[in-house]
Image (cartoon, rainbow, N blue to C red):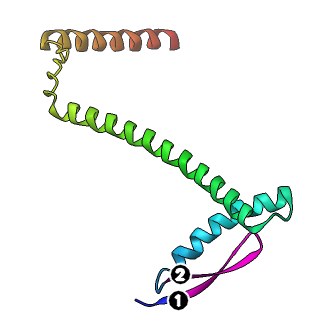
Amino acid sequence: MSQIEVEIIIGGRSFEVACQEGEQQFLQSAAALLDAEAQVLVDQIGRIPEPRMLLMAGLMLADKTAGLEEKLREVEGQMRVLKAQVEELKNAPAPEPEKVEVAVIPNDVIDALAEIAARTEALAETVDEKLNV
């Protein structure tokens, strides 16, 4: 692959940087991150010497990167714990099935309740007839 020159802008200043063909997008993305940090410095301090601006912007970006790497290590640690728990659950024996008892009403009771209901309805009809007379 051949090298090509790419213009990047950091802190309002233009730089010509060489990169491999096909890597321009990566270079532009990295330059945009550095430019964002440099712009903070320019907004806060004003015009500062180029080497100092690049150094400070690089350090600010490195600080953010270090913070993200620390968070990533924490998340990786949590993931290891969760994976271990999943494996533990996979390897654990299946729980014993619960015994569920369903109440069964004996046929004699069902027949007795049906008889009581029929008598109650007959009694209600008799009362209705006597009241309507």
Residue 99's quadrant in the figure? top left
Question: Does the segment drawn in magenta span residue 14?
Answer: yes
Given residues 10 and 36, the one toward you in this image is: 10
Disc number for residue 37: none
**What is the secondary structure assignment of the residue under circle 2?**
helix
Residue 34: x percent and y percent?
Answer: 65, 64
Q: Are marks 1 and 2 in contact (CB under 8 Å)?
A: yes
Q: Which residue is mark 1?
A: 4
Given residues 102 and 96, the one toward you in this image is: 96
Q: Which residue is mark 2?
A: 24
Left or right side of 76 for 101: left
Residue 126: x percent and y percent?
Answer: 39, 10
Left or right side of 112 for 39: right
Q: CA distance from mark 1 to mark 2?
A: 9 Å
Q: Residues within 10 Å of mark 1 (few under 14, many from 20)?
A: some
Q: Residue at x 46, y 84 (%)?
A: 22
